[in-house]
Image (cartoon, rainbow, N blue to C red):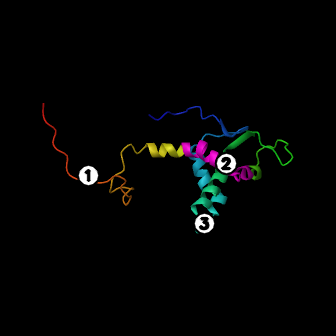
Amino acid sequence: MLTLDLTNAPRWHDLAPGVRVQLRPLTTALMVATRSDPAVEAVPEEASEEERAVAFAKALARRAVLAWEGIGDAGGKPIEPSPEAIDALLDVWPIFEAFQLTYVSKGLLLEQEKNVSAPLPSGPSEGAKATAKPARKSAKTARRG
């Protein structure tokens, strides 16, 4: 069952011990705006999927981050979110991974849930290798009791 959060309130997400960010809800409007972000559109066609993912995540975070805790400058002084600081935060690998897992992938999970049937051999998984060995012979019909 799809559960709708009608409040659409920002939520806090823990990204690392002592580091958390307050993020806007991951809405259609936010995703569409991010897809047309100039930084995302500027990614060259020959860029790798990884480069595209980083550009998209940074653009999304710049739109979604409202506040944070546990983030400071080189001297340890707390700093406020800014586009440059958000980009620098996502350059930290564990933070990037946590952002992807706790925020971005939650929206993508809904996309996967809409397909409640197993993949068909002629569907999008066509060409995938079978992992089970074929049966040696047909099974016998069950006896009727």
Q: Is residue 81 left or right of residue 7?
A: right
Q: Nearer the viewer, residue 48 or 107?
A: 48
- Which residue occupies 67% across, 51% down? 93
Residue on which the image places disc 1: 135
Mark 1 Cα within 10 Å, few/some/many (few <14, many 20+)?
A: few
The mark found on residue 47 in the picture is 3
- Which residue occupies 83% across, 47% down? 73
Which percent across, then down, holds residue 19? 72, 40
Residue found at the far left of this picture: 144
Q: What amino acid is labelled 3 in the image?
A: Ala
Q: Secondary structure at mark 2?
A: helix
> Which corner quadrant holds the N terminus?
top left
Which percent across, then down, holds residue 127? 37, 61
- The image quadrant of residue 115 is top left
Which percent across, then down, holds residue 22? 69, 38
Nearest to N terminus: mark 3 or mark 1: 3
Mark 3 Cα within 10 Å, few/some/many (few <14, many 20+)?
A: few
- Magenta segment, which residues? 86-106
Q: Secondary structure at mark 1?
A: loop
Nearest to N terminus: mark 2 or mark 1: 2
The answer for how far apart the CA atoms under marks 3 and 1 are is 44 Å
Residue on which the image places disc 2: 94
Q: Nearer the viewer, residue 7 or 99?
A: 99
Q: Are marks 2 and 1 in contact (CB under 8 Å)?
A: no
Mark 2 Cα within 10 Å, few/some/many (few <14, many 20+)?
A: few
Q: Are marks 3 and 1 in contact (CB under 8 Å)?
A: no
Q: What amino acid is labelled 2 in the image?
A: Pro
